[in-house]
Image (tube, helix red, strand yellow):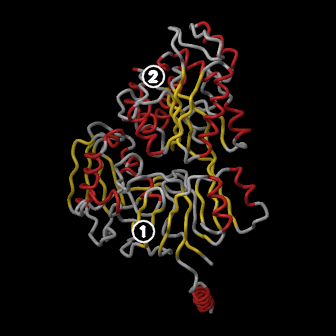
Amino acid sequence: MLGLFAACGGEKKEEVKADVPKEIVVGVTSFADTLEPTEQYFSWVITRYGVGENLVRFNENGELQPALAESWEVSEDGQTWTFKIREGVKFSNGNPLTAEAVKASLERTFSKTKRAEGYFKYESMKADGQTLTIKSQKPTAVLAQSLADPLFLIVDTTVNTDEFTTKGPIATGPFKFTEFKPGEYTVVEKNENYWDGEAKLNKVTFKDINDQNTRALSLKSGEIDIAYNLKVNNKADFEGQDDIEVQELKSLRTTYAFMNQHGALKDKTLRQAVLRALDKKAYTENLLGGAATPGKAPIPPTLDYGFDKLIDENTYNPESSKEILAAAGYKDIDGDGFVENPDGTQLDLNFVIYTSRAELGIYAQAAQVNLKDVGIRVTLKPVSYETLLDMRDAGTFDLLIWNVLVANTGDPENYLYENWYSKSPNNQAGYSNAKVDELLEELQKEFDADKRKDLIIEIQQLIMNDAATVFFGHETTYLFSNKRIAGLKMFPMDYYWITKDVERTK
């Protein structure tokens, strides 16, 4: 009798929902001017929009789980990894997912971007039926975790891959790309060949709305159903409106600014003076309404890597900032309130920021004011995210703001390596410390969790001692959505936005 009641209830529910639209609109910031997954960090868009999938993935607790690979194991020497590729999976065009297809996709990624080798370098890759074997050049503790990064999403390489830029890659997720107009919108539709159950939505439109307040108003008016990258201050926009749900998560994100050591900031004293001039507590608690923890170290306190134990010798102290500037020969020669370089030339730090995350401008403008107070001139240069990437790669900046997930492989190894290893292709700021390099190389092959933690703490302390980077704050992330949207989750690794389980209920 109970079973009959449950069945009838299920039929009634389907009847009520029969006319519910299976389409939603999501408000996002413009993040990619191409859908080629090996370009910059644009693979994140492909994964977040429900199109791209990897061999492995992270769950809501940040734990590694099977995805396109149903299992894997590593040899005793830590160099040979064997992945069993899931049977019965198809790309959205119907082509089967085999180990050979996975191998071809990974080889394509390594051939098209130097970033891939920042995760691991492989000696060989072999496919046999549904078994993929990867042998790394040296023991690599986080090889499996690295393959969860969107950079390594699996695509069908048998098609015309040149079309990925405008049409998007052919992948295995619950959705597939149907339209892409950079800076305006992206449309995905249900992948009928999806291997892990039917998507509950037929169509999702991602509307590019770069202005934070405009995104909030669009959600309030019902123009969009979900708004990403709103902040704590946007809660006030929805007071008395009970149809909006707000989720929040102490994130694994850090906002920081590179200090380019190829220019004026090659002088450690000047970098120290910059750091001591910045009232990061005021930025996070007052200007951002407590929606971030004041920064001092590369890794946020949400991860257990010694945040409270790390010693910051460059905490907020504007008087000390002025004193060390004067002692190093930085003086205001022309009486305009700004110091000149010790050789008498003008000091003007070019601070590049991107405009699609409002809090970045708040940090930068507040820093500009604080630095003016100690006599350091800063010129802000707001640009698009895509332009900022180009300027970072070209090294055309003094300060350049960055906001990044610090545990994209489940721990901070790749993040530290990518940004502060002297030979990393992304280290355009020129930071170099032989001891940091040595410890990072040791970390890559260390499998013991306690030893890895000790290494990561020591690396952080050295970076802080070198006054290498401005760590502004560690964010709380918010997700605003209409309550008619169900199945929407936040993940510590924010690779996953729209999944097969997201649906519209009315």
Camera sees residue 78: no
Camera sees residue 114: yes
Q: Which residue is mark 2?
A: 261
Q: Secondary structure at mark 2?
A: loop
Question: Compared to 61, does 257 lie above or below?
Answer: above
Question: Compared to 327, does 133 lie above or below?
Answer: below
Q: Which residue is mark 1?
A: 175
Q: Amino acid at mark 2?
A: Gln
Where residue 122 appears, as percent x and y from the top left, is 26, 42
Query: In the rendered image, which quarter is residue 318 located in?
Result: top right
Where residue 319 appears, as percent x and y from the top left, is 70, 15
Q: Residues within 10 Å of mark 1 (few under 14, many from 20)?
A: many
Q: CA distance from mark 2 to mark 1?
A: 44 Å
Q: Amino acid at mark 1?
A: Phe
Residue at (65, 54) in percent of width and height: 213
Residue at (64, 64) in percent of width and height: 219
Q: Are marks 2 and 1 in contact (CB under 8 Å)?
A: no
Residue at (69, 50) in percent of width and height: 232
Question: Compared to 229, does 116 lie above or below?
Answer: above
Compare residues 409 and 159 and report the one nearer the observer. Answer: 159
Q: Secondary structure at mark 1?
A: strand
Residue at (29, 72) in percent of width and height: 94
Foreground tag (2 vs 1)? 2
